[in-house]
Amino acid sequence: MTAYREGDRTSVTAAVDLSTKQFQLVKTDAEGKLVLATAATDAILGVLDNAPVAGLTADVVLINGQGTFKVRLAANTAKDAYLTTDADGKAVATTNAGDRVFGRLVRAGQAGEIAEYIKLNEKF
């Protein structure tokens, strides 16, 4: 039987240790388990909202929801920048064709900061 979840969040089993990756971007691997997003063209699922080790439940804020949420920035980023992931699951600005955009930055932010973004789910 197929299941579905209503809302802006989901839970997925962590494939790897994500205990230091809260508020970073994630995707599912070939087995449907959660790993860090590592490329701007990845099928980004959302932002990790807890800090699980491998085999435990990871809580994810989906990119196709509404409203705003938090994400860790990889670099200094301008207000209203369209965001994708870097190789470590941190948010970076993009305007590149083919990149997966998960959000737009609400206010300018600094590298390493947890910043607020408006949810989007599109490709450039």
Image (spheres, rainbow, N blue to C red):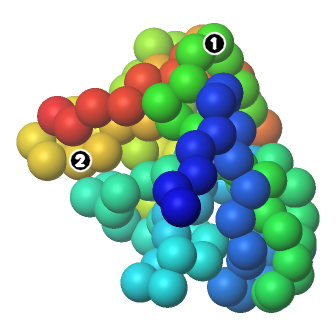
SS assignment at label 2: loop
* Residue furthest to the left: 97
Residue 97 higher or lower than 41, as above or below: above
Disc 1 marks a residue whose amino acid type is Gly
Q: What residue lies at 30% left-to-right and 45% top-to-bottom?
A: 100
Image coords of residue 59 (percent x, y): 79, 53
Q: Which mark is residue 67?
A: 1
Residue neighbourhood size for the residue with mark 2, other residues' Cα within 10 Å, grouped as few (<14), some (14–19), many (≥20): some
Q: Quadrant of the C terminus?
A: top left
Residue 42 higher or lower than 106, as above or below: below
Among numbered discs 2 and 1, the one appearing first in the sequence: 1
Residue 105 higher or lower than 19, as above or below: above
Q: Which mark is residue 119?
A: none
Image coords of residue 66 (percent x, y): 58, 15
Q: What residue lies at 81% left-to-right and 86% top-to-bottom?
A: 55
Q: What residue lies at 41% left-to-right and 84% top-to-bottom?
A: 30
In this rendering, would 94 be left or right of 59?
left
**Which of the 4 image quadrants contains residue 54?**
bottom right
Report, in whole angstroms, how far the alpha carbon at label 2 lies from the one at label 1.
21 Å
SS assignment at label 1: loop
Q: Is residue 96 visible?
A: yes
In this rendering, would 31 be left or right of 97?
right
Relative depth, front residue between 7 and 42: 7
Image coords of residue 80 (percent x, y): 45, 14
**Which of the 4 image quadrants contains residue 6?**
top right
Disc 2 marks a residue whose amino acid type is Asp
Q: What residue lies at 44% left-to-right and 53% top-to-bottom?
A: 44
Question: Badge 2 is on which residue?
Answer: 99
Of tags 2 and 1, which is closer to the observer? 1
Q: Is residue 73 visible?
A: no
**Which of the 4 image quadrants contains residue 123?**
top left
Q: Are marks 2 and 1 in contact (CB under 8 Å)?
A: no
